[in-house]
Amino acid sequence: MRISKHLSPSIYPILGFLSLILLGTVVLEAIPLRRGSHLPLIDSLFMVTSAVCVTGLSVIDIGKEFTVWGQVTIMLLIQMGGLGIMTFSTVLLLVLGRSISFRSRFVVQDIFTHSPQADLYVLLRRVILFTFSFEAAGSFLLFSRFHQQFDSLKAWYYAVFHSISAFCNAGFSLFPDSFMGYRDDALVNLTIMALIVFGGIGFMVMHELVRAAEQGKSRRQYWIRLSLHTKMVLCMTATLLVGGTIFFLVSEWSTTLKELPFSTKLLASFFQSVTPRTAGFNTLDYASMINITLLGTVMLMFIGASPGSTGGGIKTSTLGVLLALSRARLKGSADHVHAFKRSIVPTTVNRAFGIFVISVAIVLIGTACMLISQVGSIPHKESSGQFMELFFETTSAFGTVGLSLGITPGLTGWSKFILVLMMFTGRLGPLVIAMAIQAEESKGRFYYAQEPIMIG
C-alpha cells in the first residue's frame, strides 16, 4: 500500500498491460495447436503481446494453426487490449457500485480525454456503448456477406472476430491472405474501413460529435462547438485518408493495381490508405509493392491513429501540432502557435515535439537491434533488401499496425523479443513511458547565462 502511494499514476497502465500479457502468455501456452503441439514460449509471448497491444503481427497463421479456443483467446485479448486494462478495471468498479480512487480517475481521464473537466462516468458509459455498438453493427454487416460463403455459425464467428479486430485496430485475420480475397467486395471493404476509422479517431472525439449532435445546432454552430482537439483530429484524419488514397493509386497504378478495374483500384487504394493507420489488414500484397509505396506506408504507420483510441503511432494530433509549429516558425511567430483560430498551449507543443523525437529514436534503435540480430556481420551485398524489410517490420510493431513483408515467422528469437518490446512501447506511447519513469521535477534556484550556438 505504501509503495503504491509513491508510484506515478502513469505507471498503472504499464503494470496493467504487462500483467495482462504475462497472464495471456500462460493461457495461450497451455492451449495446444491443431496438430497437438504447443507454441514455443517466445512465440506465445509474441502472439499475446501482438494481441494485447492490438498490433496484428503474427508468427503463424491463426486461422489454420490455432484451435477455436486459441482464436477466442486472441480475440478476447484484442478486446481487452483495445479498450485498455485500466478502463476495464474502472468499469468493473462502477458496475459493482464501488468508488473510484483519485489516481484511477486521473489515469483514465488522461488516456481518453484532453480535458480534466469531462464527466468521467458519462465518458466511460459512452466508451462501452460506442465500442459494442460499432462492433455489433460491423458484425451484422460482415455476417450478411460471410453467410453467402459459410454456414451460419461460422459466418457469425468470422464476422464477430473480424469486427472486433477491425474496431480495435488489431489487424488479426482468420483468412490466410487477410482480405485479399475480398478486394473487390465493397460491403466488406467499407465495413472494415469504417470500423478502423471510428476505432482510430478516439473515444473523446466520438463523445464530442454525439454531444454536439444532440444539441441540434446548425452546421456552423456544430463545428464551432467542437474542441480544438476534435477539429485537429478530424482534419488530419481526412487529409491523411484522401492523401493516402491518391498516393497508393498513383504509386501502384502499374504494379499491384495494374490488372484491376478502376473501381477496384480506387477501393483498394482507399483500403490501403486506411489500414496502415494501425489496423494491419490488407487487400494487396505488400511484398509486391515498389519501394516508394513501402516508404509511404512506413510514414503512415509511424503517424498512426489518434489519442484515446485503439491505435498506436505518434498520433494525428501530434502531427497537426508539429505542422502548426512549423508554420509559426516559418512566419517568425514561434511563440504563438495556433490552429483553427485557437492558440495551442506551449506545454502541448513541447510534448508533441518530445513524442516525435522519442518515437524516432525508438524506431531507429529498434531497427538497429533488428539488423544486428538478423544480419549481424553479413556484408551488404549478401543481405541486400533486408534493411527495408526490417525497417518496415519495426515501424509496424511500434505503430501497432501489423503489416509485414512476410518475414515475421522467420525471425530469430531475439528479433521477436525486440518486436515484443516495440509493440509494448508503441501501444502505451512514448509519453506515458517517459512520464512513468521520469523523476519528480525540481525547480532550479537560478538560471544559467544565455549564449548562442551556430545552427545550420
Image: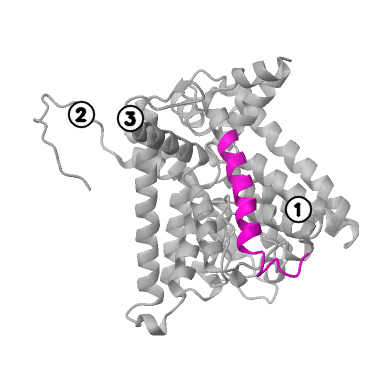
Query: Which residue corresponds to mark 2?
Result: 442
Comparing 68 with 434, the one in front is: 434
Of pointers 2 and 3, the one earlier in the residue sequence: 3
Tell me which numbered mark, 1 or 3, is placed earlier along the sequence.
1
Residue 55 lies, in percent from the top left, at 56, 55
Residue indicated by mark 1:
189
Residue visible at 47% across and 21% down in the picture: 342
Position of residue 75 relative to residue 328, above or below, is: below
Which residue appears at 57% of the width and 51% of the height? 278
Q: Given the image, on which type of amino acid does mark 3 rest?
A: Ala
Q: Nearer the viewer, mark 2 or mark 1?
A: 1
Query: Which quadrant is home to the N terminus?
Result: top left
Q: Residue at x 24, y 31 (%)?
A: 441
3D distance between C-alphas at marks 2 and 3: 27 Å
Marks 2 and 1, how far apart at CA: 52 Å
Image height check: is 178 above or below 14? Answer: below
Secondary structure under tag 1 reads: helix
Which quadrant would residue 82 be assigned to in this image? Answer: top right
